Image (cartoon, helix red, strand yellow):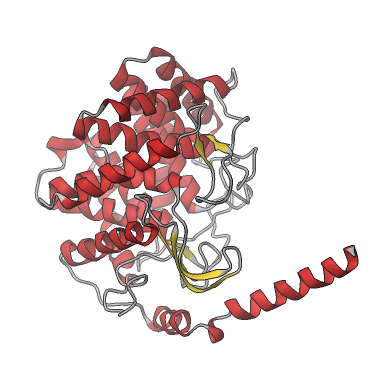
């Protein structure tokens, strides 16, 4: 019987591989050909790209019918989800899309984005576990708690509370923070409660969780939250090498981490250092951000994974990580006042714009941002991801505010988490 199951499992895997090949998926095949031929037209104005990316995020929420935002859209047969098209709602990333929509509502004077954010924040409250934690994975994959996901949804609850004054959101954020402090180790790291969908040990990107804990602690007057954030961020900062390398910082491969998770850690350090007024923590994040800026190619591309000497580990780009890096550099410019942080922004942002399809008749493709460039790279292979679109929107809003001379005045109020 076991042998029969093994044979059937192998046969199913082979069928899935065949179904996932671009030759079997016209939408994926056509978009991959565009990537390889030179990408899409770029508009110098940020608004056309921003509007299309926001519209894609709106469709991603509508696709679930719940208030949560679909994890992504599969252009090809997805062997994991065993489907095409829109995927299930993703609590983690829906959480940090909330501040993006709230900022877009103000920036573009379009209140419908604030209403979407409110719906998403209530949906997150309805899903919160009794412990205060947030589940890992998408809806339907079980209800196991996850430290990282909990921190990300805290950003959404905090932003929703500040925007609406609804006490429910503050209460949810406080319950989540208490759980994070309860499961934190004495050295500041989180070893218990990490997502079952990622490696349990190499999680220094949880610096971004510590930033969330610090923000909520400051907003709600919770000293234990601030202390917990400080313990974690000091431990992460101490682990950053002289060349900016952050060890143990990847979902799957700590020896060749994703730009995505490295950028998570950078943002956690620089913003956590800002909230805690700890220059050493901020400086550690800046060291990594500077090393990453040095890897930008003339066309704006960056490697999707790195080795510890900052050499490329792959030949594809992680678009989420590139958008995050733009946000990190702009934030560092606003925090430090140093203009040099803006040097890589124009080329990286132009490259990101060139990967966005704004003309497809397929709503799951039009306006979204892919996991990888080219489309068949190993991160989010043949998928458009909601968190890629979120960070792209954040970067465009920040760039637009810089161009309009409005960013510096609002630096302390940023909630584009």
Position of residue 150 in the picture relative to residue 46 (left or right): right
- The answer to which image quadrant residue 267 occupies is top left
The foreground one among 4 and 204 is: 4
- The answer to which image quadrant residue 157 occupies is top left
Query: Which image quarter holds the C terminus?
Result: top left
Q: Position of residue 405 (x, y in %)?
A: 9, 46
- The answer to which image quadrant residue 364 occupies is bottom left
The residue that appears at 63% across and 43% down in the rendered structure is 196
Is residue 328 at all visible to an observer of this figure? no
Position of residue 188 in the picture relative to residue 85 (left or right): right
Q: Is residue 148 above or below residue 292?
A: above
Q: Position of residue 14 (x, y in %)?
A: 71, 76
Q: Is residue 128 above or below residue 361?
A: above
The foreground one among 313 and 412 is: 412
Q: Position of residue 289 (x, y in %)?
A: 40, 44
Number of dots carrying numbers: 0
Position of residue 51 in the picture relative to residue 129 (left or right): left
Q: Is residue 136 above or below residue 112?
A: above
Q: Position of residue 366 (x, y in %)?
A: 31, 72
The residue that appears at 65% across and 76% down in the rendered structure is 17
Query: Which image quarter holds the N terminus?
Result: bottom right
The foreground one among 190 and 307 is: 190
Is residue 223 at all visible to an observer of this figure? yes
Position of residue 11 in the picture relative to residue 378 (left or right): right
The residue that appears at 31% across and 55% down in the rendered structure is 344
């Amino acid at each position: 019987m076991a042998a029969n199951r093994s044979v059937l499992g192998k046969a199913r895997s082979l069928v899935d591989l065949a179904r996932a090949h671009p030759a079997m998926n016209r939408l994926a095949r056509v978009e991959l050909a565009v990537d390889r031929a030179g990408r899409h037209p770029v508009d110098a104005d940020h608004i056309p790209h921003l509007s299309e990316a926001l519209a894609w995020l709106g469709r991603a929420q509508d696709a679930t019918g719940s208030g949560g935002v679909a994890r992504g859209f599969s252009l090809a047969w997805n062997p994991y989800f065993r489907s095409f098209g829109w995927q299930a709602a993703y609590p983690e990333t829906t959480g940090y899309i909330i501040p993006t929509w709230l900022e877009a509502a103000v920036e573009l004077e379009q209140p419908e984005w604030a209403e979407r954010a409110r719906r998403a924040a209530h949906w997150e409250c309805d899903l919160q576990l009794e412990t205060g934690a947030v589940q890992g994975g998408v809806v339907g994959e079980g209800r196991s708690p996850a430290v990282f996901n909990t921190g990300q949804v805290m950003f959404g609850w905090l932003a929703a509370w500040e925007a609406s004054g609804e006490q429910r959101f503050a209460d949810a954020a406080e319950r989540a923070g208490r759980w994070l402090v309860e499961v934190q180790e004495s050295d500041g790291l989180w070893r218990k409660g990490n997502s079952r969908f990622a490696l349990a040990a190499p999680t220094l990107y949880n610096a971004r969780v510590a930033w969330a804990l610090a923000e909520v602690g400051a907003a709600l007057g919770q000293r234990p939250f601030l202390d917990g954030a400080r313990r974690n961020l000091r431990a992460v900062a101490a682990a950053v090498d002289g060349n900016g390398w952050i060890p143990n910082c990847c979902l799957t491969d700590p020896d060749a981490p994703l730009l995505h998770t490295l950028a998570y850690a950078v943002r956690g350090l620089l913003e956590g250092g800002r909230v805690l007024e700890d220059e050493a923590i901020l400086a550690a994040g800046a060291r990594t951000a500077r090393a990453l800026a040095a890897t930008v190619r003339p066309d704006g591309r960056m490697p999707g994974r790195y080795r510890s000497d900052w050499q490329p580990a792959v030949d594809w780009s992680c678009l989420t990580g590139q958008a995050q890096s733009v946000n990190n550099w702009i934030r560092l410019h606003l925090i430090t006042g140093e203009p040099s942080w803006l040097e890589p922004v124009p080329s990286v942002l132009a490259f990101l714009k060139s990967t966005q399809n704004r003309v497809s008749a397929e709503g799951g493709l039009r306006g979204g941002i892919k996991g990888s460039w080219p489309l068949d790279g190993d991160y989010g292979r043949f998928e458009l991801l909601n968190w890629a679109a979120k960070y792209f929107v954040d970067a465009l809003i920040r760039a637009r505010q810089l161009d309009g001379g409005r960013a510096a005045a609002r630096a302390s109020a940023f909630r584009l988490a």
